[in-house]
Image (spheres, helix red, strand yellow):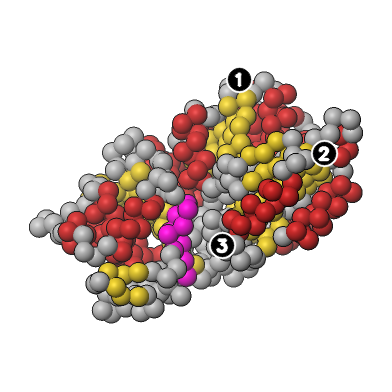
Amino acid sequence: MFLGLGMNGCYPHSVAKNDSIVQPMSVFKAYDIRGLSPGEIDAPFAERLGRAIFAQLSPKRVLVGRDMRTTSLELETALIRGLTENGVDVVRIGLCSTPMFNVLLGLADGSFDLGVMVTASHNPGKYNGFKVTLGNCLPIGQGNGMEELEKMFFDEASPLFARRSDMPGTVTDDTTALNRYVAHILKLAKIPTDMPKMKIAIDAGNGMGGAVLPRLLENLPWLEVDHLYLEPDGSFPNHEANPLKHETLTDLIGLVGRASCCMGVAFDGDADRVGFVDEKGEQIPGDLLTALFAEEILETTPDALVLYDVRSSWTVPEVIAEVGGHSDACKVGHANIKKMMRERSAAFAGELSMHFYFHELWNCESGDLAMLLMLKLIHARQKPLSEIWKPLKRYAKSEEINFEVADPKAKIAELKAAYAATATAVSEIDGVRMEFRYPEDDSQNWWFSVRASNTEPLLRLNVEAKTETMLMHRIEELRAKI
């Protein structure tokens, strides 16, 4: 296991070779840095990361925030020490959600060279990590600096890594951050003045949504809220803060029914992802939420581009085309999507995992903004939420199915070869997605996507078909092959 730095500055379970460190298992992931904490990520790791960030990127001014996990404060302190000892000036937000952190970075309009958020997002409490973002709100990720940062982290021989400043950097606390974030989200949401009384249920999952929502909700006097697990608690005592998993929504679904709410809202640990259940307690799939939000956004930005990830239903591009927009598929993961949004000037993007990205937010996510848009949508359409989203359920679709395989890349190649002769469309932008359309009998239409996880040693499968019978048949066929 890849452990944190020991007292002698070495990784106890790593291999020393030519006075450098060779890591057996990296915590530098495709989208962020994440691992067990304490264990893989500890205070010496965080201080070393601060030094590596300076050595690789030479920032002069850095924004730093953290979530409520039990190790976040010590990691934040050590990270700041690693930065300031090299003369970097740090502005510290303290406790904040990831959307709040991103918005403050964006509002700074380039006055920060980069930002670092201490969080492990939706992972269980035993994990922690770092999201590193450039001053223009573009994340450091695979293909955009993560490999170079990882190399610098382990390159003790680099003269850049060893340098120190004669004049340490300063640390300043930002005490108005929350108010500025809330004001910006309300400005973007453009809530109508005639909003009726509405009642919703919110499950903050003991995550950072609980630190932001009270300030946001006090600006919405027409909204009645029954809430669950609003108190930030890094041990996540009630359930994992992951709205993608249906089992984490049990308490929220129960509250929606008991309190006769028009919807339920569930946030993940750092509040950048948000899930919804309708007034009947049924979970709305993330890709259909993408379609729903796209409909609303395209009303005010017609002819715009909307991105969706490769696991998304055929419904998504169909709906976007029906309301006059353009669409394209993209790789999974926030770093990939934000980069593509910037390159293609997309108005909006959504993922199956319930990340929703807004051009006006520097292509970043905000569960808070998504929640406000959903409330506007219900009011505008004058229908229960179940009647709004159910017509979008045009196909039978699986949940994401995970497999442990020895060689994910080889298995993907094997599946591609097995279906190549009958596929009518093939995409390899992320693993492989193969589509099969039969004009003479569309009841046979189906597709599958299979890709290696960027965060776990798993192969992830998604399948969609015209009918439930066809879906089950294809799932079992693929399961046998995998």
Q: In the drawing, does residue 36 fall left or right of residue 90?
A: right
Q: Residue 43, position in %: x, y?
A: 34, 70
Q: Is residue 152 above or below residue 225?
A: below
Spatial distance from mark 3 to mark 1, Cα to Cα?
A: 37 Å
Q: Which residue is mark 3?
A: 456
Residue positioned 42% across, 59% down in the render = 28
Amino acid at dot 1? Asp
Q: Tag 3's secondary structure? A: loop
Q: Tag 1's secondary structure? A: loop
Read off the magenta span: 27-36
Count neighbours of disc 3 (C-alpha within 10 A) and say few if under 14, some if 14 to 19, many if 20 or more.
Answer: few
Is residue 445 within the magenta segment?
Answer: no
Residue 392 or residue 196, whichever sits in front = 392
Residue 445 disc label = 2
Q: Which residue is mark 1?
A: 303
State which tag comes first along the sequence, 3 or 1.
Answer: 1
Residue 92 or residue 125, whichever sits in front = 125
Amino acid at dot 3? Glu
Question: How many numbered marks, from 0 up?
Answer: 3
